[in-house]
Amino acid sequence: MRLLILAAAATVLLLQGSAAWPDGLNIWEPIKNLSDPYVQEIAEFAVKQHNEAVKTKLVLSKVVKGETVNFLGTSYKLVVEVEDGADLKSYEAVVWTWKIIKILLWFIGVEGNA
């Protein structure tokens, strides 16, 4: 378990700030099929974990954008559109996965939300 926590922590440190290496080489690869069932599962997981953590009732509407990076597992950076009652809001979620383990690293509002 400690190894998993260390791997997740290393991934967070790698992914914070700019998503590019100093020479400009982008480490994120675009997800070509945002409708892929596994991408949808990751998005649902992110919304569910956020709801449990902050006691909200957001409902996933769709995945707007997605990227992945393989580093000590696979990280998914998704922009998701969610329903918050009658309002639509966008969030960026990063989920780290390794085998059957998923950890929500962050879930933050995207500019333009009311």
Image: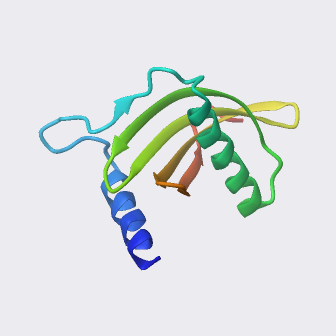
Residue at 38% x, 53% y: name it: 73
Q: Is residue 24 above or below residue 106?
A: above
Task: Using the rendered image of the protein, determine whether residue 40 is visible from the camera's viewpoint.
Answer: yes
Q: Is residue 31 above or below residue 23?
A: above
- The answer to whether residue 114 is left or right of residue 13 is right
Residue nearer the viewer, 20 or 49: 49
Q: Residue most toward the right?
A: 85
Residue at 56% x, 34% y: name it: 39
Q: Quadrant of residue 41?
A: top right
The image shows residue 36 at horizontal and vertical percentages of 57, 26
Residue nearer the viewer, 96 or 110: 96
Residue at 36% x, 58% y: name it: 11
- The answer to whether residue 102 is left or right of residue 73 is right
Task: Using the rendered image of the protein, determine whether residue 111 is visible from the camera's viewpoint.
Answer: no
Figure coloring: rainbow
Q: Residue most toward the bottom?
A: 2
Residue at 42% x, 63% y: name it: 8
The image shows residue 61 at horizontal and vertical percentages of 73, 29
Q: Residue most toward the front?
A: 99
The image shows residue 103 at horizontal and vertical percentages of 54, 58
- The answer to whether residue 75 is left or right of residue 29 is right
Image quarter in which the C terminus is found: top right
Q: Is residue 57 above or below residue 67?
A: below
